[in-house]
Amino acid sequence: MSEEFGIGLVREARERIAGMVSRTPVLVNDEINADVAASVYFKCENLQKTGAFKARGATNAVFALSGAVADAGVCTHSSGNHGAALARAARLRGIPAYVVMPSNISKIKQEAVRSFGGRIIWCDPTLASREKAAAAIAGETGATLIHGYDDLRVMAGQGTAALELIEDIPGLDTILCPVGGGGLLSGTAVVSSRMSRGAEVFGVEPSAVDTAYRSFKSGRRVTESKSDTVAEGLRTVLGERPFRVIQRHVDDIITVGEASILEAMRTLWDRLKLVIEPSGAVGYAAMLEYPARFRGKRIGMILTGGNVDVDLIQWPNRT
Amino acid sequence: MSEEFGIGLVREARERIAGMVSRTPVLVNDEINADVAASVYFKCENLQKTGAFKARGATNAVFALSGAVADAGVCTHSSGNHGAALARAARLRGIPAYVVMPSNISKIKQEAVRSFGGRIIWCDPTLASREKAAAAIAGETGATLIHGYDDLRVMAGQGTAALELIEDIPGLDTILCPVGGGGLLSGTAVVSSRMSRGAEVFGVEPSAVDTAYRSFKSGRRVTESKSDTVAEGLRTVLGERPFRVIQRHVDDIITVGEASILEAMRTLWDRLKLVIEPSGAVGYAAMLEYPARFRGKRIGMILTGGNVDVDLIQWPNRT
C-alpha cells in the first residue's frame, strides 16, 4: 500500500476524539446466549452520539484538518448516518458542513443532518450523481471532501469501536461486523489483527447487495450490486482503501438474507431492549443463519446504529 | 412504623443481589438535553435482567429467605414484570415459582415468566381474584408469598437502582420515578433522603389511574382508580408499606396524560435508541407537560422497563 493504515492511526484517533464521542457500553443477554449457545458481547454503537458509529470517523477526520483548511468547511455525500456525523463534528469545530443526500433518504436521517446544522444539497439516488454534486460543492466553497469510508482518517476513527470492545472483553474468538463501504470493517480488522489477544474478524453483508463478498472472494473490487436491501446503510460498495485492508486482514465475509435481517432486528429489539436499524442487525442474522459456525464461541458484535423510522418497519409475520 | 425501612436494608440488598442483577448504565443525550433545557441522566432499567427493575427486588426477596422456607418455593400475583423477575430469581436459587397472572396480560409478559421456568396460574383481571388465587396456591404448596411491592425486601431491592444512580451522578437536583404500587418509589425516596448529596424525589403517575397522587395529597391510601392507562405496569394502587414511606420521604407526585406518555415513549425510542415500555416513559412525560418545573436542573430519571409488544403500540399521529 502506498498509504499506511495501521493500529497507530486508530490509537491517534482515539486520543483526538476523546470526550467528543461516547465510550459505548457492551451488553450481554442471558436469553440470547442460551438461544445461540454462545457468549455474545454487543458493542452498542446505536447508543453512540448521532445514533451510529459514524460519529467516530467523522469526528476524527474533521479534527485532523489543519486550521486553515478546516475554516472553509467540510462536505460529503452520504446515505445518512455519515452525513449527520459530519454535520455534528463540523458544528463542534465551528465550521460549515455541506451534505449531499439522495432524494429518497429516510426522513429521520434528513432531520438528523439538519438538527446538527448541516446544509443539505439534494441529488438523484445514484452514486454518480452523488459524487458529482459533492465535487461541485467542494469546488464552489473550498470545503474539504470527507468521504464516508474511503478515507484513512475515517477508517481509523471507526476502528476505535473495536479497540474499546477488545479492551473491555478480552479473549474474544470472533468479531462480527456489518460491511457496506468497509470503513468500520477495515478499522476493526486492523485493530484485531494487531492486538495481542485479537479475534478473527468476519464482515457480514446482505446477500442482496453482496458486493463486498464478491470482491473479497474474487480479489477484484466489485462495484455493481444486483438487488436492494432493507439495510439501507449497507447499500454501497467497498471503497478502494478499505478493500485493500479487508483483503489483508479480514478472515471471511458472510452474506445473509432479508428475512434473517428482519428477524434478527426484531429479536434484538425484544431481547436487548435496544432500537437497532436493519444494517446493525446483520451480524446477529449471520448467527441465526449459520448457528454451527458460532456455537460455543465468544463473539463480539458491533451493533452499528439505531437510526430507523419506527413507523416504516415492515416486521416479519410472527407465529 | 412498626417495621423499620431505611437505607441500611437497601445496602444489604445490594450486597445480596450483586452478580445476579446488572449495574445498568446511565445514559445522557445531547438532543434531549437541548429540547428540555436541562441535564437528564437516564438510569436504564430496561437493560436490567428480565427487562425491568423488578429483578432487583425479587432477587433480594428470594435470596433473603432461609433455606428451609425457600425450599417450598415462592409465589406471587403480578401484572407482569414482577412475575418474570420472581421466576428468574427462583430459578437462580433452584426453587419453584408460582405466578398468578390475569388472563388479559400481554403475551410478551406471559412468555417471560415461562422462559424462566415459572408456573403460571390464571385468574380474572381483578385485584380480589389475584389475591385469592395467590393465597390458595401458597396454602397448597407452602410457597412464600412475595408481593410485588408491599414487601420490605422487595422495596429494599428496588432502592438499589437509585443507590447506583446517585453514586454515578453526584449532585442531582431531582429524581423522577414512575409510581404504581410504590415499591420503586419508596426505595428511591429512602435512598435519596439518606444520602449526603440526595435529590428531591417526585413520583410520576398516569392521571387516568391517579391513586398514588390522591393518596399522597389526602394522606389516606386510595384503592380505587377511575379509569385505565396505556402504562399497564402502573395499573395498581399503593401498597400499605410503600405508602408510609412515600408519605414521609417523597417530595411530590405528578400526574401525566395518556398522549404525553405515548409522545414521551416515542421520543425516547427515537432519541435514546432504547425500547421503553409506556410505564417507563412517564417521567419524561412529566418533563414534557411541566417544562418550567425542570428547566436548568440536573434530573435523574429511572427508565423502569422495556417489556412491550412492539406490534401492539398505538403510536400517536405525528406531524
Image (cartoon, coloured by chain):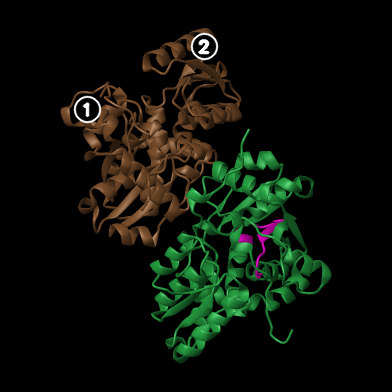
Chain colours: A green, B brown
Where does the image place residue A222, in percent across and percent down from the top left?
A: 75, 71
Q: Residues within 10 Å of mark 1 (few under 14, many from 20)?
A: some
Q: Residue furthest left?
A: B218
Residue B165 rendering spot, x and y as whole percentages: 38, 48
Q: On residue B142, which mark appears? A: 2
> Which residue appears at 34% of the width and 28% of the height?
B181
Q: Is residue B160 left or right of residue B106?
A: left
Q: Residue at x 41, y 75 (%)?
A: A92
> Magenta residues, as a range?
A165-182
Q: Is residue A206 visible?
A: no
A111 to A241, vertically: above or below: above
* Disc nearer the start of the sequence (2/1): 2
User: Label 1 is found on which chain of the structure?
Assistant: B
Which numbered marker is on residue B121?
A: none
Classify 10 Å Cα crowding around label 2: few (below 14), some (14-19), many (20 and above): some
Kindly identify the amino acid type of the residue bearing the numbered disc 1.
Ser
- Where is B153 relative to B275, above or below? above
Q: Position of residue B262 (x, y in %)?
A: 37, 43
The residue at 24%/59% (across/down) is B296
Q: Is B211 situated left or right of A149 in this image?
A: left
Q: Are marks 2 and 1 on the same chain?
A: yes
Which residue type does callout 2 highlight?
Gly
- Name the residue located 38 percent from the left edge and 25 percent from the top edge: B151
The residue where tag 1 is placed is B215
Chain letter of disc 2 in the image: B
